[in-house]
Each structure stands twice: as C-alpha cells, then as structure tokens.
Amino acid sequence: MNQYVIHGGHPLFGEVTVSGAKNAAVAIIPAALLVDGVCRIENVPQISDVTLFFSILEELGAHVRVLNRHAVEIDCRHIRSTKPSYELACRIRASYYLVGALLGRFGQATVAMPGGCNFGVRPIDLHVKGFRAMGAEVTEGGFINASVPGGRLKGASIYMDLVSVGATMNVMMAAVLADGYTTIDNAAKEPHIVDLANFLNSMGADIKGAGTDTIKIRGVDRLTGGTYSIIPDQIEAGTYMAAVAAAGGQVHIKNIIPKHMDCISSKLLEMGVEITEQDDSLLVRRSGPLTHTNVKTLPYPGFPTDMQPQITTALTLAEGTSIVTEGVWDNRYKYVAELKRLGARIQVDGRVAVVEGVGRLEGAPVQACDLRAGAALVIAGLAAQGTTTLGSVHYIERGYEDMVGKLRGIGADIEVVDVPEPEKKEAGVS
C-alpha cells in the first residue's frame, strides 16, 4: 500500500511534459482488436489502466510487444477468445470498449460489467441501443452478452438521446467493420473521440465527421494495421495548470495541443492565472491572489467534468464565493469531505457546490476516492501549510504517469511511502 506524503506551501517552478491521453489510450488499445494485422501505437501513457488492458488483450490471444516506455506493438491476428476474464475486465471502467471492438470484428462478445471509479450511476443503455440498432442481440447482468445472428453488424442510423463519450466511441468501433453505412447523430465531440477516429482511419477505416455532432462511418471489410501516435492528455495538462493556480509559481507545460486547453484556460484566466500560449506548450503563472468564479461542467467544448475536482480545489483558495455545478455526473463531490479536513469551506447540494474561499489550507491525512479526486487532493496538499498524507493512491496511478516524479521536477516536496497492509486477525483471536 503506497501513500503520498506532501509537505506543502511551496510554489512550483520549472517545466513538465504531458504524457499521452489516458481517455484516448483506454479506447485505442481495445480498438486494436478490430485490426487484422499489426499496429504500432506511440505516445502511450505509462498508467495502470493501460497495463491492465495489455493483460486483457494478451489473455484473448493478442501478442503485445512493448517497444519502449511509450510505444507498443499489438498483433491481434490470432485472437482465440471473445470473453475476457471477469477478474480483469471488472477492474476497469473502459472495459465496455471491448464489447464494441469484439462485436464489430467477431460478431460476439461477453464482457464483465465495468468497474473503475465510482462517482455516480453510469448506465450503458446508449451503448446497447447502438449495438441493437446494428442488429446485435444484447443481454445485461453481471456480464454484457452481445452477438450478431448473421455474424456481421449492419450499418444503421443512430441518435444519441444524451451526449455520451463512451457510447459514441463504442458504437463507432462496432460500426467500422459493419456492412453498410452508420450515422451517429448527437455525437460527443471530445478530443479523444477524434483521436480514436484518426487511429481507426490510419488502420484502414472510413470515418468522417468526428469532432462534430454527426459522425458517418462506411463499413470496410478489414483493418490492416499501421502506426499511430496518441494525442497529449488534456486533463493531465489541466491538472498541472490547476496545481500552479493553487500553489502559485510559474510552470512551462509542454507537449500539449493548446486548442484542447481553451475550456480550462478560460476559467483559470478568470481566476487571475496568467497563461501564455506557445506552439505546443503553455506558460502558466500565478503570483497574485485568486479571484472567485463560477464553473459548470459540460460536454466538450465545455469545461470538462474530469477537471471539476481540481478547479474546485483551487477555488477553495480564491477570494469570495464560487459556484461549481456538475453538469455531467450525479455524484462527483465525494472528495469534498476530504478537502474539508484540510480546512476548505464547501457546501454541496445535489450537483451544486458553494465554495467559500479561505486564506489557507492546513495539511491533514486524507484518502483518494477516485482518479480525479485523488489528483485534486494532491493539489490541495501542495497548496496547504504543513504535511498532507494521501492514501488510496492507486486511483491516481490509473490515469497519471509518474505524477510524483513530475511534481518533484517542478519543486514539489512529495514522496511515495510504502505502508504495510494491516495484518488480518484470525477468527476468535482478539
């Protein structure tokens, strides 16, 4: 069991390089199952979710060869199963992408209901609606069972009742090898959706319109392989921007696509953070006081829900009262109780949090409850006076590559401490 021990109160200075996008990688890697050939994927983040997906693909019969820290070669020509083990699939939220990929190529899939972070009900009804529209028979329980009576999906017109990133990507995967044309209307437009489409196209798919409300897919007979590089991680970059906002200092954030950062940069600018855009980097500086603002999370190009805990943490140190509204998930404020242990003043009512700025935070023992909440508590620890001990850091390692090393590189006093797991007492022994 690892913990992060953070001695806070120090501004951040230096430069940090952003890794490949977690949200793109966890879709692109299972999408390799659609490829009847060898694909080389570059700029792969070193995170536990990616490692887990490698294990799942190998269990199904793929050959996964790690070329270096950020490049992998995946050969799915000899897949022998369409049922990943329950033990692996239930540990990761993005396991539902295995359904679209396996169903699209092999006409069948049996995948455990997804796990990962728990911050609200996340139904897969839109995924199922899309698969059924293309001719699949789908049942749900402990597993998602999907099959195509004729062996190949049929193109269809699919309207998403709600803008859903997961459903858009999953249906897109299923449709690339379907017979005929598929149209996805009211599609999500996040950068990682465009990245998945670009990956599939580089392997031989025919997808148009990714990044707009309507995605059009002409099914092809097979995907043959190729080389692709994953985009930089918008949320990782935003997390380091929020860390500078909270702790102060000046950090050069490298290897980003500045356009992807506009929805985050605009709010930080309102709060008094200085941001200078360069070709593939941002210079982020905060020396004066933070100003209160209001934030509402929305589908892209709105403010991302995956940045809500981090910016809320920064707002605890802003002058005045800020209102944060969670417009995507029902229950993403579990971390607030932990922030209060550090001295934050936040009141939550449903999807709305009222944040009263405080002069300072004080270090305390806290626990991460999900990936982005963990990142928010790291930010709080960096800004707080004294020592913060953060447990359950495995959540953070699901989506951030070497966060501790990168933060130490910009002057943070943070270290990983190995804490022995408590011994289990034998029955009847006090």
Image: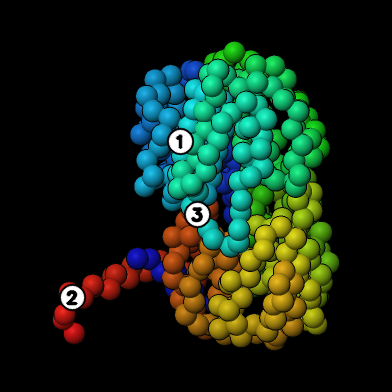
User: What distance separates the C-alpha of mark 2 from that of mark 1?
Assistant: 38 Å
Q: Residues within 10 Å of mark 2 (few under 14, many from 20)?
A: few
Q: Position of residue 391 (x, y in %)?
A: 44, 71
Quadrant of image for the N terminus: bottom left
Q: Position of residue 220 (x, y in %)?
A: 63, 15
Q: Position of residue 312 (x, y in %)?
A: 69, 70
Height in image: 360 above or below 414?
below
Which residue in the structure is indicated by mark 3? 116
**Local SS, label 3:** loop
Mark yes or no: residue 323 visible.
yes
Question: Is 92 in front, or is 384?
Answer: 92
**Local SS, label 1:** strand
| 242 on left or right of 302 | left
Question: Is 182 in front, or is 169?
Answer: 182
User: What distance separates the C-alpha of mark 1 from that of mark 3?
Assistant: 18 Å
User: What residue do we see at 64% from left, 53% from top?
Assistant: 235
Question: Is 156 in front, or is 207?
Answer: 156
Which residue in the structure is indicated by mark 1? 110
Q: Quadrant of residue 423?
A: bottom left
